[in-house]
Image: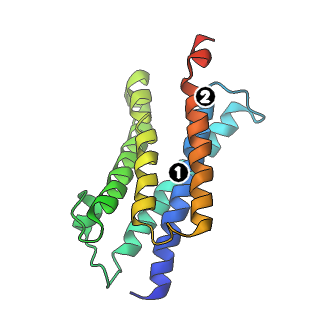
Amino acid sequence: MNPAVWYFARSAGLVAYLLLSASVLLGVTMAGRVQLAWPRFAVEEVHRFLAILTGVFIVLHGASLLLDTVVHTGLEQLLVPFTSSYRPLAVGLGVCAAELAAAVGLSTWLRPRIPHGAWRKLHYLTLPAWALASLHGLLAGTDRFDPWFAALFAGTLAAVLLATVSRFSKSRQAT
């Protein structure tokens, strides 16, 4: 594989993960009815923009892997989980994460046509998508043993878990 393509694939995957983490963090914070400094409509627009950009970088990550000549990745491996010859579990988790993220995106596009409760339940799929993407990066990422990656991962993990626990804590639900 051309080193530039390989670096691009890795970078696109990492950027997609960071954008997904930021989008999840913002979404969980908004759902928790936390008082934010910006008006709610502005925060929702930033959340929507982050989610769209996440999708763009997921596509860039997958599309650049199609150019890999070392590990032959075809469309089937990008669309059907656990069919890759390269780390099938890790890659399969990434495929599942991408497909869950796509389902959430589709549900948001269909939001005016589906009941709010159904949309909200579908939107919760973002949390398992983020968890699967996290596992994908830990198990498949070639940078997973580097200190900078560990720090980045620990930071996103702590932020999302803290926000999620805060969002679903019993004391929060009582108010």
| x then y, percent, for residue 88 | 26, 63
Front residue of 74 and 142: 142
Q: Is residue 151 above or below residue 1?
A: above
Q: Where the C terminus falls, by quadrant?
A: top right
| x then y, percent, for residue 40 | 68, 31
Assign a secondary structure to mark 1.
Answer: helix
Q: Where the N terminus falls, by quadrant?
A: bottom left
Residue at image position (60%, 44%) is 158
**In the displayed structure image, the side of residue 22 where residue 68 appears, left or right:** left
Residue at image position (35%, 80%) is 67
Q: Residues within 10 Å of mark 2 (few under 14, many from 20)?
A: some
Q: What residue does disc 1 label?
A: 20
Separation of disc 2 and disc 1 at Cα?
19 Å
Viewer-nearest of labels 2 and 1? Answer: 2
| Residue at the farthest top position | 174
Q: Earlier in the sequence, mark 2 or mark 1?
A: 1
Q: Quadrant of residue 42?
A: top right
The amino acid marked with disc number 2 is: Ser
Count of number-bearing discs: 2
Q: Is residue 135 above or below residue 8?
A: above
Q: What residue does disc 2 label?
A: 166
The amino acid marked with disc number 1 is: Leu
Assign a secondary structure to mark 2.
Answer: helix
| Residue at the farthest bottom position | 2
Q: Is residue 142 visible?
A: yes
Q: Is residue 47 visible?
A: no
